[in-house]
Amino acid sequence: MMEYTNTPKPDDRSDNARKIQDNINNTRENINEAEASMKFGNEQDRQNALAKNQRREEAIAALESELKDEQAFNNTND
């Protein structure tokens, strides 16, 4: 019988806030690109882009909440 000696890696949250902020920035950029492309698509494409941007806005709100949590964590553990 083989004994397992795997130990979990320590929780490294040091760069989580930066990664979340990068995701927020990328999502905002995607919103802007979709809005720019709406001028060239048909009505169905426009509706799809509007719906997708709505979901992106909701994702940004969740990411901003998560970012605040990470910043608070980092401030209490510095």
Image (spheres, helix red, strand yellow):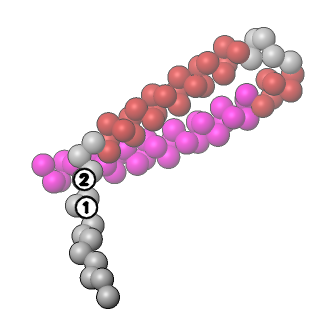
The amino acid marked with disc number 1 is: Lys
Residue to which mark 2 is pinned: 12
Q: Which mark is residue 45?
A: none
Drawn side of residue 8 relative to residue 48, left or right: left
The answer to whether residue 72 of the structure is visible from this angle is: no
Residue found at x 78% / y 31%: 48
Residue 55: in magenta span: yes
Residue 44 figure quarter: top right
Numbered range of the magenta stretch: 49-78
The amino acid marked with disc number 2 is: Asp
Packing grade of label 2 (10 A; few <14, some 14-19, many >=20) is few
Drawn side of residue 3 relative to residue 50, left or right: left
CB atoms of marks 1 and 2 within 8 Å: yes
Residue 25 position (above or below residue 57): above
Secondary structure at badge 1 equals loop
Residue 2 position (above or below residue 7): below
Q: Which SS does the magenta portion mostly show?
A: helix
Q: Which mark is residue 9?
A: 1
Image location (x, y in percent) of residue 32: 59, 19
Image location (x, y in percent) of residue 52: 69, 34
Drawn side of residue 56 relative to residue 52, left or right: left
Secondary structure at badge 2 equals loop
Residue found at x 28% / y 78%: 4
The answer to whether residue 41 of the structure is visible from this angle is: yes
Image location (x, y in percent) of residue 78: 12, 49
For the residue pair 9 and 64, the one nearer the viewer reads as 9
- Extreme-bottom residue of the structure: 1
Residue found at x 37% / y 44%: 67
Residue 32: in magenta span: no
- Extreme-right residue of the structure: 43
